[in-house]
Image (cartoon, rainbow, N blue to C red):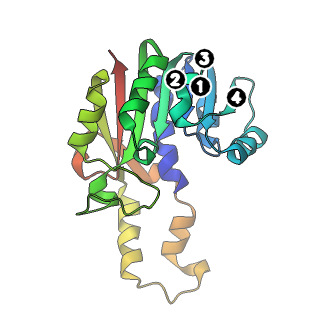
Amino acid sequence: MIARHLCAYKFAAEYVHNKSVLDIGCGEGYGSYYLSGFAKDVMGIDYDTSIIDYAKTKYQRGNLRFCVVDAKDINTVRDTFDVICSFQFIEHLGDAQAFLGKVKDLLRNGGVFICSTPNRKDASPNSEAPFNKFHVKEYLLDEFRELLGVYFKQVEVFGVRRGISLDFFRRLKKIGIFNFLPEAIDPVRRFYKRIGCDNFDIGSGRIETALDFIAICKAR
């Protein structure tokens, strides 16, 4: 769901004003583009050549660039950055420790790393193995904090949660009581068509049951 992913970028926007930013695992580039509206400059990287070509074509600003870089090779990036973002990405890595070490090396003094990942309790309940076949390792809250704490002196974790309206319509969708209605008048399908970032909340309460964790990390 794009709205859920974009929430992390909107949350990060307050940290990137007039900063040099690296967006790791930028995908189609809409998040990097969003941040470039606030930042001094933004570099979005992804391993997929075709998706970077798409991003270069669709999202253009003078302070925005996209490059093909695999996560295991981010040490080949020659610049350093004030802010590094990595959203819904670390769960795809087999060696998150090596990745975080390289991230820390790319941060300037006083830099900030902003990282989000799905909560294993929500994404793969009662299972250590991810339900999502593309995920290598999902984290519980304490595991995520502990992983980041090895590399960063200050780690503050927030939770991304469904807002009241989304939670309500999600329950209706599960019940299926409007399934017999045509799409044009089905309130559930109409709601999901217009879902946006405002339908999610980010805060410090009840983090252990959140959909996603998002951490603000300051380098050692």
Mark 4 or 2, nearer chain start: 2
> What residue is at 37 percent from the left and 55 percent from the top?
163
Classed neighbour count for the residue bearing mark 3: other residues with Cα under 10 Å, few (<14), some (14–19), many (≥20): few
Picture quadrant of residue 190: bottom right
Q: Are marks 2 and 1 in contact (CB under 8 Å)?
A: yes
Residue 58 is tagged as none
Label 4 vs label 3: CA separation? Answer: 14 Å
Residue with the mark numbered 2 = 16
In terms of image quadrants, where is residue 147?
Answer: top left
- Crowding near the residue tagged with mark 4, few <14, some 14–19, many ≥20 C-alpha atoms within 10 Å: many
Return the residue nearer the eye: 42 or 219: 219
Who comes first in sequence, dot 2 or dot 3?
2
Between marks 4 and 1 in the image, the one whose residue lies nearer the viewer: 4
Upstream in the sequence, badge 1 or badge 3? 1
Frontmost of labels 2 and 3 is: 3
Dot 2 falls on a residue whose secondary structure is loop
In this rendering, the count of numbered labels is 4
Q: Earlier in the sequence, mark 2 or mark 1?
A: 2
CB within 8 Å, label 1 to label 3 = no
Q: Residues within 10 Å of mark 2 (few under 14, many from 20)?
A: many
Which residue is disc 1 drawn over?
38
SS type, badge 3: loop
Q: Amino acid at mark 4?
A: Arg
The dot on residue 65 is: 4
Tell me which amino acid carries mark 2.
Val
Q: Nearer the viewer, residue 6 or 93?
A: 93
Whole-percent x and y of residue 69? 62, 34
Rounded to the nearest angstrom, the CA distance separating label 1 from label 3 is 23 Å
Instruction: Confirm or deny contact between disc 4 and disc 1 (CB under 8 A).
Output: no
Closer to the chain start, of discs 4 and 3, is: 4
Q: Amino acid at mark 3?
A: Arg
